[in-house]
Image: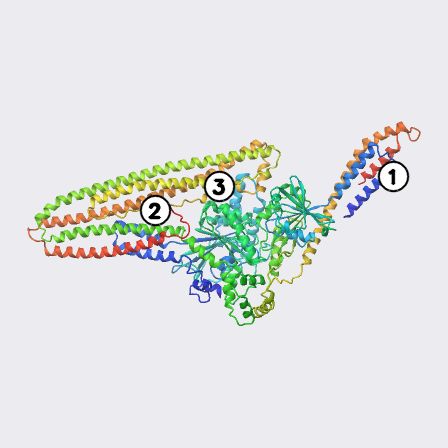
Amino acid sequence: MTEAMRALVDLLSDVRSKLQGSGVSQRSEAHQILEAALNRLEQTLARRPTILVAGESNSGKTSVANLLAGLDALPSAVVANTSVPVRLRHGKEPAVMARTADGAVSLSLASNDDALPRFLHSGMQSIEIEWPTMLGNNFELLDTPPWPISPQLIRDADILLWCSVAPRPWTESERQAIAGLPLRLRERSILVVTHKDALPMSDQAKVMDRYREHAQELVSAIVMIDSTEHKSKATFDDLEPFVEELSKSLSAELGESPLVGDPAEAPDTSSLQSLRDALEPLLEAYWDHRALTGRRLCRHLAQALTPVISGAKDVGADASSASEPGYGPDAAILANIASRLSTA
Amino acid sequence: MGDTAVLDEAPSSSAPGPRTLNATGKRQGAIGEKLERWRGELIELGSKLDQVVEPSGKSLVSEAARLLSRQVCKIAVIGQIKSGKSSFVNAFVRAPDLLPTDVNPWTTAVTHLHFNQRRSGDPAAIFHFFTETEWNAIANGGGLLRELTERLVPGFEPELLREQINSLRHRAASRLGPQFQDLMGQAHSFDEMNSGVLSRYVCAGSYAAAKPPPTDQAGQYSDITRAADVHCSGGPFAFPSTLIDTPGTNDPFLLRDEITRRNLETADLYIVVLTARQPLADADVALLRILRGLHKERLLVFINRIDDLSDISQDQREIRGFVEERIKREFPDSEVPVITGSARWANAALAPAGVSQPFDRRSLAYFVETGLMRREDLVQAANREGPRRDFKDALLASSGIPEVYDAIDRLMSQSRSAHILRQVGQCFSELARASENTVQAELSELSELQSGAETTARKASAQLPHLDAELRQLAEVSGIIETSAKSIDEQMREIITEEIRGMGERLRAEVSRYAAEEQRVLADTLRRGRGPQEWRCEADGLRRRIAENFTVGFDHAASRLANLQARVSPELHQLLSMIVPGTHPPHEPDVRAFPRPQPNLTSLSSAVVLDLATPWWSAFFNRSPSPDERGKEVADLIISEFSSVIDELTASAETALMGYGSNMSKWSFGICSSIIETLRRRREELRSAYENLAAEATGPAAPQAVEQRAQQIAGLRSKLGQTAAIVEKLDLINEQLQLRPGTSTGK
């Protein structure tokens, strides 16, 4: 959460306590309007950003989503189905839901290995997953089918992660896809170059040059990461020592290492770190933007209070003409709140 | 070095020959070996035929011979950027270091690798630079894209294209200095080649315009090189072939994309290279859709880089299934071979220094799994006991390249060249038979004359009126044939004109229907308040309908022509048997078996405004005020854009049908006229002989005349023998040429 956001949250809780401690009747119209407005405002402000993970087919979208979500893999029933958007958010208990036109259907996680029920494929609009490891991630992830995706998904997105594969760096169709996105989204976007490990070191730098030259102006950051799913499934069991031996003898003969893709390779943590580092300023920008919107809404609210205050004045004038004439206690408090809100 | 082995004219020793290529023994010979053998035999028979054929047939023979000697099968390798096209080409021609490859695409040049085509005196390589005009057309016009956007929104300047053009200009000028201007329109040629030379013209490498020129001269001329023609020896081909490496499509450097599209039209076969990691992405499908307009069964899909997959055998199967299914949807009625493989493996196996490319655990597991290597081999190799050869064989066998050779060989036997071979074979056969018949007739005539050796002047005088009558009859028949040839030509022209008119009307109606539908949909979308981004005109659907409609119409017209010819042929033969009594009528050519023409559909692939991507359209939508007006504008646009496409299509159909029709009548009438001409000449000779006889004193024939005739008879006998031998050989070749592997293309 950013400075601006914190200031705004402080302001709102200040206003709320002023309202509650004021003695303005809870049943009064003014109190109800103000409370409803504050609730709406807090809700709106607290909305976690949706990170849209998009790209052309097989560009590593799901891997990137999994990496950020802290998942080894999506539940297998889901993996087989990236033809619908998958929304990932934090939840205390793991839960998977398929959203259809008729509502949400909860999918049992016990039957992970089963394919999705057939009837779901036809009417399924999206899959929603709640996952405990998302804790601390102040955002929701939206893993999407291959580009192009429905405009609705783009409208709902706050931050974009565009996945592109390093072995085919930057195509015209990718450029067109990103250039066609609203500026609002491009201003908070990362070009995630996946499958870095498929290229030799020297080529990685060259590919980055190409991305920088062509895409820098379209996105806010470019990050290159390893592919996470690119792990060898094949082993030689009993022959493993021989394979090692062969590898050594070949590399001695050729002067270079012939074996790549060691199965004992540790999961890459630097990829996640660089992705998070790039994401951090975008999340801040998101919250700053939220705060800006919030402040504007506060000022609107202050303005909207003016007729209510004058209404309260009249009421006060009737009830207690003894004290300050024409200025009831409710009106005073409301004016105080309004002036506090207008400082936002 | 491996690269020079292919580039040098000297026979290569390090590159393995075609027969040794596949350890599994799948490959029997070089690509197009049979076709090349038949071509050679036809050329040889052509020169023999030239000796025996009547003078009137000589031009037909030499025309056909010229056609045969010029046959080249052009194979274009196309695909998105970074599909591994250049690696594939290197593996395919068995020269791992021939074309430079790089992680980033660079070159705008189209590289032609020519095989079995170098004539003495030809340079080994020529590099063509853009001419000033071409360069300016690109630099100032931005080519097709600019033209299209201009057509859509006049005065619209595509910023991006201009930037790219400027950077290209700047880079070329900075790299080449003042000589830059002088080089335009020039060509550099080399009598000897190596990949160092190649990399100065056709280079892949650093892309950034800001970078200083590379020190090693790599890519020195690459910005201004339009095309490279390189003659290679060795290679996998037996038939004269040209392999064309194109810049990739879907490149944000728009010029490259355009250069590729322009080159799509010129090839006979197409190899579409996909990458296993992203098989058949939308951009690939778009490319295939363009090709669909062009060709039906001249396509092969190679899914490269299976070595990138995490579970090679499993993923490979899935990917191939996916691609096959998708292709089936795009090309419902044709069998497109889909082959998976890895050019990297092939290149590793072909590298002269041994296996220099790293190959990984997954690959090894795959080789063991597919039975290409035994587990023991791994152990043996590890213990340095086993032959290193096993690795190379396994790599090569699983690279998919041998399968590609087989598939290309099959496709080539259905290509335009094969079609021409078939046509020439049939024509030769007709000519040889006609020649055989006339010689036969003449021979029997002379023999008869000789047997009545006591022919006297009286008898000769009595023969003269008969001969005169025969000559008159011949003149009459040849007159009939001439008029009927004219009338047939006229009828054919009438049929063609009628068919073409009908075709044009039907196609235009198709476009109008489509335009009306799009107008309705767009206006509807806009009225419901939806943005234009939800409407996208898929010109491909229209292309498909046009192509279907066109093909049906074309086939109909061609079969009408064939039927006309089929009616005429028996009449011709009847006429001939009338004037050549006692001889066999010329071998009846089955007109329906006459090779069908293949209409040219290239104009269908010409880009139209509708192909432009959404961003260009937004400028268009910003101008027109009401939904109905916008709808109307789009409908007009569709009609006007496709009007020229249809004009070109029908014009090409007309040309093809005219050629087809006149070819058919040229051959049958040509052969008949040739027979009649021969008969007339012989009869006139005979007549003058009789006249001489009649003038002589009564008595037995002069011994010189008898001797002369005996010589003539001997000459004719030997000629008959030769001709019969030619006919026999031609029959054999034609029979083999008709046997086509797979589904037949002709009817």
Query: Does label 2 lie on the same chain as label 3?
Result: yes
Residue under numbered circle 3: B543
Residue under numbered circle 2: B593
Q: Are marks 1 and 2 in contact (CB under 8 Å)?
A: no
Q: Is residue A139 left or right of residue A343?
A: left
Q: Please state which of residues B291 and B371 is positioned toward the viewer in this rendering.
A: B371
Q: CA distance from mark 1 to mark 2?
A: 101 Å
> Disc 3 residue type?
Arg
Q: Nearer the viewer, mark 1 or mark 3?
A: 1
User: Which chain does the residue under circle 3 lie in?
Assistant: B
Counting from the top left corner in percent of width and height, residue B479 is at 23, 41
Q: Are marks 3 and 2 in contact (CB under 8 Å)?
A: no
> Disc 1 residue type?
Gly
Q: Secondary structure at mark 1?
A: loop
Counting from the top left corner in percent of width and height, residue A143 is at 65, 48
Query: Does label 3 lie on the same chain as label 1?
Result: no
Residue under numbered circle 1: A21
Q: Are marks 1 and 3 in contact (CB under 8 Å)?
A: no
Q: Is residue B208 left or right of residue B743?
A: right
Q: Secondary structure at mark 2?
A: helix
User: Residue B59: in sight, yes or no?
Assistant: no
Q: Name the image colouring.
A: rainbow
User: Residue A311: in sight, yes or no?
Assistant: yes
Return the disc, 3 or 2, that comes first in the chain's sequence. Answer: 3
Query: Does label 2 lie on the same chain as label 1?
Result: no
Q: Is residue B631 above or below residue A94?
A: above
Q: Nearer the viewer, mark 1 or mark 2?
A: 2
User: Which chain does the residue under circle 2 lie in?
Assistant: B
Q: Secondary structure at mark 3?
A: helix
The residue positioned farthest toward the right in the image shown: A322
